[in-house]
Image: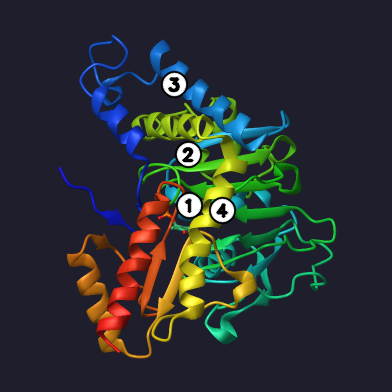
């Protein structure tokens, strides 16, 4: 068996101890004689799995009792519609557009009401986070929407926007559990799990209880109503049961390494190694305004497309895979999520140094 260093933006690297446990429990989960994949989602064994997963997530994020945790399907993208359908009482919402995912959410919301783009960084290929201290928040806005960590462009809100009292809704797909957060600052905090937590096919929605009502836009499907899933403990229909089980394992792994404070320290350490090198390299450059840099997604370029392509190819041959940048940015992107070990980043930087020497 040989594992690579996988810098994919998602689906992405998972912690090896978790993968090993999954393998160990594949044929016989905890004496049941079956895999969790084969298990009824109405069984007491599965109920314990989902209950433990929720409790561990609550412990990790310090989620207050007046917030519900929902394990839903449809990925993060389905929330782009579900949020306006459930929250747009006045049919007005303000969007801060800092990348493709925020833009998609903004465009989707336009189907259901008046979505205002109150700030954007599109003028400079989303390479920075706009000043959000005094934005023209709409008087009757039902919520203000952000994408907190921009997976494609590698920027992160280091400070939440001043929403002037309006509800904040945040997509944290690519920074989920990468550092401690204050859940009370949000109405909804949600993310697809395939970036920083588990396998693809699920989104976790943490939503303040009072936002879960029957007062949704006319025609909202039962499956797209938060109340449906909240009332049934995410078991209205068959959930992505195996994914919930894997996420639960990752939550336990995070607890075992010291929780989100410890994780943040490790993430800062890892990112610093890569950014320090980029800041000193004559060949490779980061593409993001330094103060807005993400700890999770690190885009970088050389001055030539040929050299970029050569680097990606040689890196792959050396066991550093999925480093090609998003097509809208070009160059390279290293996603260094929670499960990427520090050794992976150190080894990548060593490889980059060697490549720089050989090619300049
Ligand atoms: C990947 C990603 C999405 C889309 O996730 P899906 O689960 O594929 O719908 C949305 N937002 C952000 C920030 C992402 O990184």
Residue displayed at 43% across by 76% down:
300
Residue 339 location in percent, x, y?
41, 46
Quadrant in the picture for the N terminus: top left
Cα separation, mark 2 vs mark 4, equals 15 Å
Q: Are marks 4 and 3 in contact (CB under 8 Å)?
A: no
Q: Is residue 174 above or below residue 283?
A: above
Q: Which residue is mark 2?
A: 72
Cα separation, mark 4 vs mark 3, equals 24 Å
Cα separation, mark 2 vs mark 3, equals 15 Å
Residue displayed at 67% across by 34% down:
63
Q: Which residue is mark 1?
A: 76
Sequence-first disc among 1 and 3: 3
Q: Which mark's residue is nearer the viewer, 2 or 4?
A: 4
Viewed as shown, does residue 269 lie left or right of 306?
right
Q: In the picture, residue 213 is in which quadrant?
A: top right
Q: Which residue is mark 4?
A: 172
Sequence-first disc among 4 and 1: 1
Name the one closer to the observer, 265 or 152: 265
Cα separation, mark 1 vs mark 3, equals 22 Å
């Amino acid at each position: 068996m040989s594992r690579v260093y996988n810098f994919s933006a998602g689906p992405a690297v998972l912690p090896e101890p978790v993968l090993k446990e999954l393998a160990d429990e594949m044929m016989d989960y905890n004496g049941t004689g079956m895999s969790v994949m084969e298990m009824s989602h109405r069984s007491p064994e599965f109920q314990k799995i989902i209950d433990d997963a929720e409790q561990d997530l609550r412990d990790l994020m310090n989620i207050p009792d007046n917030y519900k945790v929902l394990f839903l399907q449809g990925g993060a993208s389905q929330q782009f519609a579900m949020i306006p359908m459930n929250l747009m009482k006045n049919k007005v919402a303000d969007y801060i557009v800092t990348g493709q995912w925020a833009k998609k959410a903004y465009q989707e919301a336009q189907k259901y009401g008046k979505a205002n783009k109150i700030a954007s960084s599109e003028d400079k290929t989303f390479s920075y986070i706009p000043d959000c201290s005094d934005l023209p928040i709409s008087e009757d806005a039902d919520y203000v929407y952000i994408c907190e960590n921009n997976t494609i462009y590698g920027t992160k809100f280091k400070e939440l926007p001043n929403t002037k009292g309006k509800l904040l809704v945040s997509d944290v797909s690519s920074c989920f559990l990468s550092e401690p957060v204050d859940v009370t600052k949000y109405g909804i905090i949600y993310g697809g799990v395939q970036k920083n937590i588990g396998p693809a096919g699920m989104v976790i929605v943490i939503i303040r209880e009072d936002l879960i009502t029957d007062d949704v836009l006319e025609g909202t499907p039962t499956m797209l109503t938060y109340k449906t899933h909240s009332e049934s403990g995410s078991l209205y229909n068959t959930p992505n049961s195996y994914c919930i089980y894997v996420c639960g394992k990752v939550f336990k792994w995070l607890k075992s390494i010291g929780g989100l404070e410890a994780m943040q320290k490790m993430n800062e350490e890892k990112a610093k190694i890569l950014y320090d090198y980029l800041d000193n390299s004559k060949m490779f450059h980061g593409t993001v305004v330094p103060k807005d840099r993400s700890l999770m997604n690190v885009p970088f370029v050389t001055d030539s497309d040929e050299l970029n392509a050569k680097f990606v190819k040689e890196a792959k041959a050396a066991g550093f895979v999925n480093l090609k940048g998003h097509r809208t940015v070009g160059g390279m992107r290293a996603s260094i999520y929670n499960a990427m070990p520090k050794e992976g980043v150190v080894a990548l930087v060593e490889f980059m140094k060697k490549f720089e020497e050989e090619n300049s």
